[in-house]
Amino acid sequence: MFTKILIANRGEIACRVIQTARSMGVRTVAVYSDADAQALHVTQADEAVRLGPAPVADSYLRGELIIQAALDTGAEAIHPGYGFLSENPDFVDAVTAAGLIFIGPSADAIRAMGLKDAAKALMVKAGVPVVPGYHGDRQEPDFLADQAAKIGYPVLIKAVAGGGGKGMRLVEKAADFAENLASAQAEAQTAFGNPDVLIEKYITAPRHIEVQVFGDGTDAVHLFERDCSLQRRHQKVIEEAPAPGMTCAVRKAMGDAAVKAAKAIGYAGAGTVEFIVDGSDGLRTDGFWFMEMNTRLQVEHPVTEAITGVDLVEWQLRVAAGDALPSQQDELSITGHAFEARLYAEDVPAGFLPATGVIDHLSFPTHARIDSGVTAGDEISPWYDPMIAKVTVHGPDRARALQSLSAALDAIQVAGTVTNLGFLRHLARAPDFVSGDVDTGLIERHSDTLCAKPSPTPRDLAVAAATAAEIAEGPLTGFTLWQPPQRLIVLKEAEEETIAQLTVESANTCTVQIGETEVRLLRRAGHWGSPAILHNGRVTVFGTESFTFEIVNPLARSEEAMGGDTVLAPMPGLVRAVAVDVGQTVEEGDRLVVLEAMKMEHVLRAPRAGVIADVAVATGDQVTAGALMIRLEDET
Ligand code: ADP
Ligand code: ADP
Ligand code: MG
């Protein structure tokens, strides 16, 4: 076995590899960009080497720097993780030329599967079923349009160099073909530097079922299937193993086909053979077709580890170090059922926009396996994938594993950035998913309910207000510390402001008036009703839906308005008194107006010295929030 390896990656997968290496007594070297100098993978590794600035082209894609780092630190092998250089055959050649070992397949195997068209041709030869379509060299638009007509609509245009769903277009009818072809080619050129496409029959309501394979260069086995049908724009969201409705016969047919694919290229290491499956009438031995092979460890490998008990990274290290396959096919079996959900910093109602921000608070349940590369205080930066964690659960059967997934998702707390947690929680309870009736269109069909922007309830607002009150006032320990015992808290969420009036009744009870609604809260286990935390001038309330509110200081806001020339009503209220007249000179901090809002009086003071130019309100006026009350001008 190696004594030291370098991990050419970041985030959760770098941490994942370090964990297994450590358990095997193998020392680890991390590499990092300037944005990751304090990252978890850097602190967890035995040594770390800086690569360069944050952009991946200056850091994690600098193969020559990574190889030099391995040589300098005495690492014998390089683990590429997934993404970045993991499927780059030139990098593998360079690693080998430097006298190091690449923990993965040979450069030739990667090349053979690198382009989808060549891979399909190879699979046809090996006797593996492929999706009907055109995967030849010709790229003239008219020729491809003819092929599409021959295949029969709907068809899928795919970039041959594609990945991550990019350069892919579904075309429903001939009239739309030319336009979609042009945009797929343009996107492929930008993303992969290769505009070539292939045309495939589009399988309606398909399932994505993939087979985990493992080879040692001579022999290969499979570690059963994963169902990755829950996708959004061809990106996986929740994966599971085994596939719902799988039969022994179909599993054997798919497993055999995948092993045939791996053996056809003398595969060494962990790989995944992806199939598109027609699930419209149950799974059939003649109803699956090869899509592509990913020649690396897959993001969703933990579900396979959960049902087989195999540590795939350990297998990778052993085979790369020269061991034969650690297990034969008949020694492998499935126990129970597993799910993995991908937790991302993204704004779901805004169309799954990647989000950034500092994670102020992060808490995970103990009953799930958590693969994460971040910790509280870390920033989700715009430079890399916004993944926060993968949440994997295992249970004796599908129903209980899914229940465990829901419970795990419900227990996760993240504050500081928006996440897809609410979406995942809804998805885990979606009736079609619960019943195992999955296909790649499920999320899209239910996107209205899955992606809806929830609104906070009066109770959420009340909990936020009570929690927010503690920053200004210290713990709510009762009347005596409170002058007065009532206060107003202004909360802002999604551009919407709410005024909450808080009345403390005892150390552990308060009532919060929000509009017409009164909510009574009890303090239990340090929380006002629900768990909530204060962070960075904001308060986050955790529940089935989590909400983050900005705590607005209405008085400060009115003073800042328009550079201090105007005093606006910070909230709706009744003008109790006006203390100044037009032409009067005032000093900063002088009383101008007394406003009563929700039975409390607020004194509005001069934001700076000056002369009163305008008094727009009179005692007894009812004003709306933002109404002009006083205008100041400079002394002349
Ligand atoms: P997998 O099947 O392992 O999930 P995908 O086909 O989804 O892989 O993605 C292919 C590669 O693209 C992965 O190696 C992953 O690193 C990368 N990738 C996936 N999603 C994103 C993303 N949102 N942003 C950047 N890279 C991504
Ligand atoms: P990528 O390299 O981007 O992962 P894939 O070829 O693996 O590309 O396809 C990604 C996803 O697109 C699949 O998981 C599936 O949801 C969908 N897809 C691919 N091929 C077909 C097809 N022929 N018919 C229907 N859906 C398909
Ligand atoms: Mg794929």
Image (cartoon, rainbow, N blue to C red):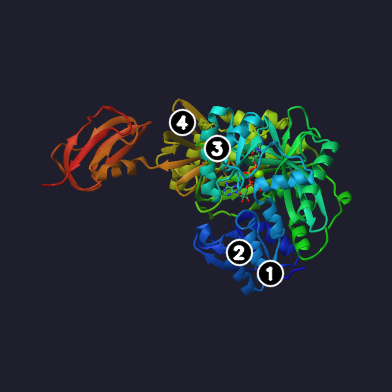
Q: Which of marks 4 and 2 is nearer the N terminus?
A: 2
Q: Alpha carbon of mark 1 to alpha carbon of mark 3: how far? A: 45 Å
Which three-letter amino acid code belongs to the residue tagged 1?
Answer: Leu
Q: Where is residue 13 in the image (x, y as percent from the top left)?
A: 65, 55
Cβ–Cβ under 8 Å for marks 3 and 2? no
Q: Quadrant of residue 90?
A: bottom right
Q: Position of residue 564 (x, y in %)?
A: 25, 45
Residue under pointer 2: 43
* Residue at x 80% of width, y 32% of height: 284
Residue 232 versus residue 490: which sits nearer the camera? 232
| Comes first in the chain, label 1 or label 3 | 1
Whichever of labels 4 and 1 marks the residue nearer the N terminus, that label is 1
Left or right of residue 267: residue 383: left
Q: Disc 4 or disc 3, which is closer to the eye? A: 3
- The residue singled out by tag 1 in the image is 100
Residue for point 60% across, 43% down: 138
Question: Is residue 180 or residue 358 the one in the foreground?
Answer: 180
The residue identified by callout 3 is 141
Quadrant (top left, top right, bottom left, bottom right) of the N terminus: bottom right
Q: Earlier in the sequence, mark 3 or mark 2?
A: 2
- Residue positioned most to the left: 636
Observer-side mark, 1 or 3, equals: 3
Cβ of mark 4 under 8 Å from ligand 1: the answer is no
Q: Name the amino acid, label 3.
A: Pro
Cβ at disc 3 under 8 Å from ligand 2: no
Residue occupying image coordinates x 49% and y 62%: 53
Gap in Å between the C-alphas at discs 3 and 2? 52 Å
- Which of disc 3 and disc 4 is earlier in sequence? 3
Q: Tag on residue 513?
A: 4
